[in-house]
Image: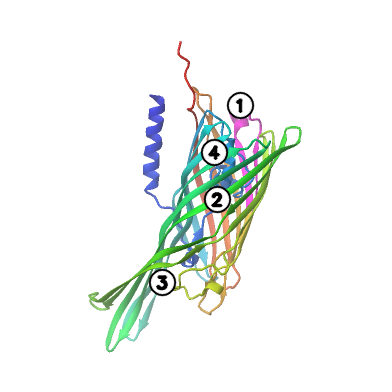
Amino acid sequence: MLKNKKLLFIALLACIVSSLEAQTDSPYSRYGYGMLRDQAVGPSKSMGGIGYGLRNNQSANPMNPASYSRVDSLTFLFDIGVTFNSGKLSDGINSERKYNGGLDYITILIPIKKRLGLSFGILPYSTVGYKFGSTETNGSVTYLKSFNGSGGLSQIYGGLGYLTPLKGLSVGANVSYLFGTIEHTRSLPAISGTGTYLSTDNSELTVKAAKFDIGAQYEMPIAKDKKLTIGAVFSPKISTKADYQNLHYLYQQSTSALVQGDTINVKGVDAGIPNTYGLGFTINNNDRLIFGADVTYQEWKDLKYSAYMNDGLDNSKRFNNRWKYSAGIEYMVDPYDRNYLKKMKFRGGLNYSNSYMNVIDNQGNIDGYKEYGATLGLGLPIKDNIGGRISYININFEYKKLKPKFSSMISEEYFGVSLNVNINELWFFRRKVE
C-alpha cells in the first residue's frame, strides 16, 4: 500500500509539473535552435554541469550512458527537476528583467540484471522564448513592430550501461527521439498605395529525428580509498530533414480586418545536428569528496540549416564550433554516519562556453557571445525507514552571464534556482515466504 501511494504521488507530481514549460527569455534564441540545454541532471547541475566521468548511485546520469552500470541490483531511482530563472537583459542604456521557469527533466534508472542498468526519461535539448518590439510613427499613423518566438527541442531517451568483464570498464549507449517545433512571429507595417497595413509572418520549423550517444567509463584505484574515473562520449552528426510552414497575413491597420492570407509548406528542409565529443574525469575519495572536470566540443560550423527561417545569415556565418569547459566538486562529511548534517551534500562548480550561433545586430555586426557560469548546491537526505534507502532533495543555485563581443549587442545575466527530488527505492527483491 505504501508503494502504491508513492507511485500515485510520483504520477501526480509529474502531471502537475509537466503542465509547465521550461523556457528562456533571451533574444539570442531567435537564431538557430535557440538556447542549448545540456543534459546535466540532479547533482551534476550544481557541480558546474560535469558528468562524463561521474558515476553516481543516487541518480541517472544521461550525459554518459556508461554510468548506468553503477546502479545496484535492488534499486529503483526516479528523478524529477524543476527550474526558476530571473534574468536581466541590458543594451548598455536600458535594461529589463524577465522571469520564467518550469519542468526541467524526468529520469528513471533501474537494473536489468547484474552489471547492466537501464535508464529512460525526457530531457530538454534547446529552448526558444523571446518577445521584443517598438512603437513607431509614420506621418499620422502609429504602428507597432514586434518580434516573438517560442518552442524548442526535447528528447525522449532510453539507454543501457554495461560493466564489462574487463575490470573497471563500462560502456553504454542512449537512443533518443529528438522532436519539437520552433516558432517565430514577426509583425511589421506595410504600405500599399494610400493604405496602411500590418503584415504578420508566422514561421514554424518542426524537427523529428533519432539521436545517439555512445559512452565509456574506466574506473581505477589511484590510492587508498581513492578512485579515478575517466569518461568519454560521442554523439554522431544528424543530417536530418524538417518541415517548414509559413503563415502570412495582411491586416487593415485602422480596422484590423484581414485583407490577405497565404500559407507556404515545405517538406524536407535542412536541420542538422553536429558531431559532439565529450571527455572528463572525476576523483572519488571514499564518497566524501568528489571532484572532476569536463570538456565538450561540438562541430557546428558550416552545418546545414534552413534558410527559410529568415535569420539573415548563410551556412558559412550562422554557426560556430562550440567548446564548453566545466569543473565541479561535491563534499559530504561522512556517508556512513547516522547524523543528518553529516549526510548532507555540498556542491559547487564553474563553467565556460562560447555560443554555437552567431547573431546580427542593427549595424550589421555578426558574432556570438561568451557564456560564464557558477553553481552552488545542497543535497538534503531523506531516509526510508522501511527499506533503509537514502533519497535526496537537491537544491541548486546558478549564476550565468552572456557577454557579447560588440557593445551594440545585448548582455544578459541570469540567477536560477532549481529543485530536484531524487527517490531511491528498494524495489527489486523477493520476499522470503515461510
Q: Outermost residue toward the top? A: 434
Q: Which mark is residue 133?
A: 3
Q: Outermost residue toward the front? A: 165
Q: CA distance from mark 4 to mark 2?
A: 18 Å
Residue 386 in view here: yes
Name the amino acid, label 2. Answer: Asp
On whether residue 372 falls in the magenta region, the answer is no
Q: Residues within 10 Å of mark 2 (few under 14, many from 20)?
A: many
Q: Residues within 10 Å of mark 1 (few under 14, many from 20)?
A: few
Quickly name the residue at label 4. Answer: 59
Quickly name the residue at label 1. Answer: 339
Name the amino acid, label 4. Answer: Ser
Name the amino acid, label 1. Answer: Asn
Q: CA distance from mark 2 to mark 1?
A: 40 Å
Q: Residues within 10 Å of mark 4 (few under 14, many from 20)?
A: many
The location of residue 83, given as percent across then percent down, is: 48, 49
Report the mark closest to the observer, 3 or 2: 2
Front in this rendered view, residue 311 or 101: 311
Quickly name the residue at label 2. Answer: 213
Q: CA distance from mark 4 to mark 1?
A: 22 Å
Residue 408 in view here: no
Name the amino acid, label 3. Answer: Gly
